[in-house]
Image (cartoon, rainbow, N blue to C red):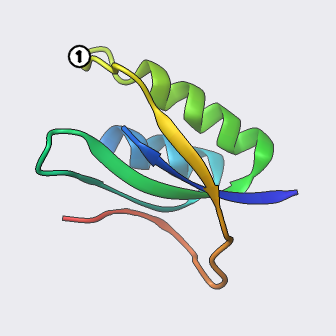
Amino acid sequence: MAKRLTYIISDFTQKRANSYGITGWCRNTAQGSVQGEAQGEEEPLGKLMKDISSGPSHARVDGVDKTDIELKEGETKFQVVR
């Protein structure tokens, strides 16, 4: 079953999302966190959330807040929004 969710956590996220076939976006916020939306099948989304929760080796992840949201039709890629 396909799902779409929003999460609060860059190139790390984009590379992982692309490797799992996930679409969506992420961006750095003025508050110093990363925010985004990811869409795909449940298993790959779970893998992405696990990766985001750990973060890259040079990052500290204090927590990840996620919320299920509606699917977005026609989305074809995952991008970093600047």
- Residue 31 left/right relative to 60: left
How many numbered discs?
1
Name the foreground residue: 69 vs 76.
69
Residue at point 18% right, 64% down? 82
Residue at point 80% right, 60% down? 2
Compared to residue 27, the image places residue 66 above or below, namely: above
Name the foreground residue: 4 vs 77.
4
Which image quadrant is residue 58 in? top left
- Residue 25 left/right relative to 10: right
Q: Residue furthest bottom?
A: 74
* Residue 26 coordinates in the image, percent (x, y): 36, 55
Q: Which residue lies furthest to the left in this view?
A: 30
Which image quadrant is residue 73 in? bottom right
Q: Which residue is identified by label 1?
A: 58
Q: Is residue 26 visible?
A: yes
Residue at point 74% right, 58% down? 3
Residue at point 67% right, 70% down? 70
Check the picture and name the quadrant holding the N terminus: bottom right
- Residue 68 left/right relative to 52: right
